[in-house]
Structure formats: C-alpha cells, structure tokens
Image (cartoon, helix red, strand yellow):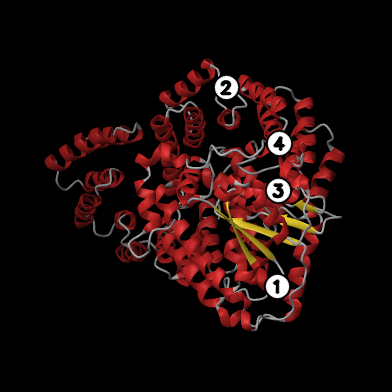
Amino acid sequence: MTLPNKALLEVRRDIDAGRLDAAEENCRHIVQSVPQQSEAWNLLGWIQCQQGNLSEAIDAIRKAIAIHPDDAELHRNLGYVHAANVDFESAIECYRHALTLNPEDVDAHNSLGVALKQSGQLDLAAEHLREALRLRPDIPTLYQNLAEILRLQGTLDEATKLYEQAVQIAPNNAAFKNGLGILLQLDGKLKQAIARFQEALVLEPDHPLYAHNLAEAQKAFRTDEAAIVHCRDILRSMPDSVEAHLNMGDVYLAQNDVQQAATHFGRAVALQPGNALAHNKLASTLIDLGDFDAAKTHLEKAVRLHPEFAEAYFNLSDLVIQGKYCFSAQMLAKIESLLSGGRVPLKAASIMHFALGNNLDKQGKYDEAFCAFHTGNQIQQKLGEEFGILFDLELHRRNTDECIAFFDASYFDKPPPGGVDSELPIFVIGMPRCGSTLVEQIIASHPNAATAGELPEIGRLVQELSKTHHHDDAFPHCLSNVDAQTIHDLASQYLSNLSKHGKDSTRIVDKALSNFFYLGFLFTLLPKSRIIHCRRDPMDIGLSCYFRRFGSVNWSWSLESIGAYYREYNRLMEHWSKVFPSQIYDLHYEKLIADPETMSRELIHFCGLSWSDRCLEFYKNRDAVKTSSRIQVREPIYKTSSGRWKNYAAHLEPYKKAIEGSDNPPII
C-alpha cells in the first residue's frame, strides 16, 4: 500500500471514531505532500463541513473537482455543502452536473429532489425522487422524501401510501411513524394517527415533536365516541392488558371523564403494581379529583419504582406549592444529582427544573426559584428550536390582524344566518393563569349549572369548516359565503357535545381560554352566547405562565414571547369589546378575591341564573378539575397569589418591556 493510501486509511479511521480534528490534520499533511490527491481534498471538505467551516469545505472540494472534473461523486458532495450553507441554487447546479456525469446516481437524484423542494420547485422535485425510487426501491428515506413533497402538493392518499411503504421497510424508524401520523391526521383519520404517534414515542420516548403531535391529535380526538368503542373492543379481547387500560384511561381523560380515567388507571395499577407510569397516571387523576393523600401514595411509589421519573417529581411539586406535601431531603438530593450529572434527557431535565422551582418558590428562595424555572424554559426553547416548533410572533400578529379586519362592525350588522339562539353555553376566556378555574367552579357550583372543562370543540369546528366547506381558505375567510344550513349544523353539533356534560343543567361552562381568538365565529354560531372575560394583573399572569410547565404551548417558553402574546390577546379583546360589548362581562381576579360575595353575585346574575349560596362554597364541589389550579381551587378564596410577581420584580423587565412595547401605552 502506498503512503498516501495508508494515510487516507488512517483518516477514515479517525472519522469513524469521531476524531475529526485529527482527521483534518492528517488530510492537510496529505495534500501538502501530494497536492494532486483528490480524495484527500474531498475528505478534507467533508470534515470541514461537519465542523461548520462551510466556505473552507467548498474550497477543498472544488480543488478535488479541479483534479478530477468528471467525478460525479465530487460534484454531488459539493452540492451537499452548498445545501448545508442554504445556497440551494448552487446545490441544484452541482447535483445536475453530477447527473450529467452519472444519470443513475441515486443520491444525486434524491438530493436534487430535496433541494428543488426547498426552492419551491415541487413538480421537478417529485420527478427526481420518483427516478431515485425507480433505481433503488429498497431505500425507505426516498419514500419519505417523495411523500413530503406530495403532502405539500395536497396529494395525501399517495403520500400516505409512500410513508406506509417506508414503515414497512423500516418498522423501527420513529420519524417514518411520525410522518405517517401527520398525514393520517391531515386526512381526518385521528385514531390511526394517534396510534402512529404513540408508536413513534415508544421508539423515541423523549422526542418533543412526537409528543407534541400526539397531544394535538388526542386533543382533536376528544369528542369522538368511536375512541371509547375502539378501546372497549380491545379490552373485551384483552381484559387484563395493562396497556389497554392505560389507553382507555387516556381516552377518558381526553374527554374530561376523569372518574372513568381513574378507574382504568387504577385497574392498570392492580394488574401490574410495579408499573411506575400507571401509578403516576392514577395519581394525576386523583389530584384532579381532590384526593391528595391517595395521590401522594401513588406518586411516592412511582419514584421508588423509577427514581428518574421526572413527571412524578413534578406532580409531587404541584402538591408542594399548595402546602399538601414536602419533598424529603433524599428526594431533593436525587433530583439535584440527576440534573448535575447530565444523565437525564433534555425533556426530563426541563421537567425536573420546574419541580425544583416549585419547591424553592414555596421556601421563599425567589432568586434560586427563578433560576430553576428559567433553566427549565431555556431547555424547552432549545428543544423547540431543534425541532422547529418555536412561537412565530409575526404569523400570530398576521392572524390577529386578519381576525380583526374580517369580524368588523359591519360583519355583525348583518351576520350570516343559521345561528342557534341557545343560552346553554357560558364561555370563560382569557389568558392562562387569569383565575378562570375559580370562576368556572363558582358557576358550576350552582344547582342549575355544570362545567365541560376546556372543550376543544370551537377550534375543531373551525378546522372542520375550513377543510370540508372551504378547504382553500384558512380561518376566518372560511366563513365567507357560508350557507345558513352549515352554520346551523355546526352550532347544533357544538350544543350536542356540550350538553353531554350537564344533562339537566340550564347553563354549562366551556373554559377553553383560547376561544377568545374565535369569538367572531362563536357569535356567528351562537349569537346569544354569554362571554366571561377573566382579567388579572398582567404581571402576575406573565410570571405564572413562565413558572407553569405548559409543555407544547411554545409562547410560554420566554418572558419576551409571553409578553408579545399578551399584547396580541389584549389587542384582540379590545376589538371584541367594541364590536359586542353587552355580551362580554369583564371579571377582574383582584376584585373577585377582595369581595367574593359581591362579585360572585354579579357573575351569577350575568349568567342569567338566580343566586345560590352554594356558589360561595365552590371548594366543596367534588367535580374533577384538570387545570393548573386543580389543587388551590379545593380551598376557600385566599389572596396570597395576588401580587406574587413582586417577589420576582428584578427578573421581569424583559416581560414588562414586551407587554408595553414601543407603540403601545402601558398595559395595566
């Protein structure tokens, strides 16, 4: 073996072992001694690309091409570097050159297809991916890449079949399962989509994007009775299946039937007492139901079984912050040891930082608590950036602008016909952490009222209208020229689902806070709706949102984005208040806790109900509560949470600047 060949072999060994610095140094020695060694220039370029030195990588591979201009692989490799440098025009040119030299270069066809997709040339992109598949039908990634192009073109059936083929070839690839799930969800096949997302998470349990997709699919699936039928069929054939009971519990939980969820989680625990996940799920539902002592028992069991179980520690910290539990020194030492050791996945680390923050806040160690919450959110932000699910403020602003422009005063001067004049729904809206759970429970304690919790129905109906009737128009433009029968059918569908949560009630609360964005649509369907807008000091709201682990709520991961989201919410609510002021009741949290009886009487009167003293004893209501305030709402009203932000004032300047902004007066 010649000297350059031996040296190149050593370079490849260094690359395989991850020793890129050593590999780069060896390559440089080779090209200095043998400048015409094109493979050394090629490898040097590849190494520099991996190190992020893209301009140097381009120069190195160009030198290799100058030595062997007819080598298709070198042109393709140069295309890779241009693509990494987001220069798709140059990448496309390189891939095309490679294909003139070798028309059957599968990698070049694939890479050209991907680059053409990035530049918006979808038809050409599909042509090259189809050719790559003709040449190599055994490569699953080619099916995935073509499917993604077809998805963008709206050809969902073929895209779905391609992903199914990819999964068949590589059944243990989580990305393929996730991609298939997305297509199934887009096609309205929620049961199948949920199953694929769950399979992806089994393969990669800590992948935040897969968890986000599963959560969104389950949210959309909440009211589908077929889910319960499906799970019951499985349980009939496998009555002792722990997994089947856990799935059944999840379905009931998604439908706000916490009692039934607890029954199935409890059955899973009985069948398999060593299952930490089952103990945690049961404990969480027991907290929802107000049985804190039993919840503590199951959470402690969960962490004994699985000492790195972040969710169980967080649920315990929820009890800590309300004075229902105290972490042992051993538990705190374990959490801190796990975090300092860097051995837990990022998602779990984020959850543990929130748990520590809750504990430190309860102890009055405010600076340390803020640091813990800040670190937890920074990790969330990092994961969001990695998987492309960060908050898009500009898109959110555009959506708000379109909503305000579409639902102007003239729209409601002559709204579309077909709405249903029902007084059954009471919509409670606002920002998270605004006191809405307290308001909900005061109303639901009335003998003629009930609560459905946070129903996803209004948002789901918007999606249904966009897809079924005006699939090319996003909200709110999907309402243009909609016929009266469609409006009536959507309103009736909503009322049918709502009424399941209180069969003998004359008022039922829907506490999906984000319905504030859909008020124009809501009043189109249900023109006699009553809206309770829960307001609270924005400083307390911002702090509470930042300290509350909201998971996939991506605007909650930074103080700046919380402030920006608040401004857009406030701007939209000001618009709604001008358009239909008589149907929106602003209830300030600070006034409610200062004078509960007066404000509760006003609230009940606005709902069109006679007064009941039971509304002042809301904390005796045994109904399940699934929100972040599920523990504190079990107690009489107290004032300690008002003005809490002052303990953290030194840290909140970014939020304050964001809510005030340069073009708005201060928001108070």
Question: Which residue in the protein does label 1 denote?
Answer: 527
Q: Check if mark 4's residue and mark 1's residue have beta carbons within 8 Å.
A: no
Q: Circle 2: is it few (<14), some (14-19), or many (20+) Cα within 10 Å? A: some
Q: Nearer the viewer, mark 2 or mark 3?
A: 3
Q: CA distance from mark 2 to mark 3?
A: 29 Å
Task: Indicate left or right for 81 with 256 as reference.
Answer: left
The amino acid sitting under disc 4 is Thr
Q: CA distance from mark 4 to mark 2?
A: 20 Å
Question: Which residue in the protein does label 2 denote?
Answer: 326
Q: Residue at x 41, y 24 (%)?
A: 340
Q: CA distance from mark 1 to mark 3?
A: 24 Å
Q: Nearer the viewer, mark 4 or mark 1?
A: 1
The amino acid sitting under disc 2 is Cys
Across and down, in percent, residue 367 comes to 38, 32
At mark 4, the secondary structure is helix
Across and down, in percent, residue 371 comes to 39, 34
Across and down, in percent, residue 147 comes to 55, 60
Which quadrant, please, contains the C terminus?
A: bottom left
Q: Residue at x 53, y 60 (%)?
A: 148
Q: Quadrant of residue 603?
A: bottom right
432, 506: nearer the viewer: 506
Q: Circle 4: is it few (<14), some (14-19), or many (20+) Cα within 10 Å? A: many
Number of callouts in the render? 4
Task: Indicate left or right for 596 with 13 as reference.
Answer: right
| Figure check: 26 above or below 550 | above
In this rendering, does residue 404 appear at all? yes
At mark 2, the secondary structure is loop
Q: CA distance from mark 3 to mark 4?
A: 21 Å
Question: Which residue in the protein does label 3 denote?
Answer: 442
Q: Quadrant of residue 466?
A: bottom right
Question: Which residue in the protein does label 4 denote?
Answer: 285
Q: Residue at x 51, y 29 (%)?
A: 362
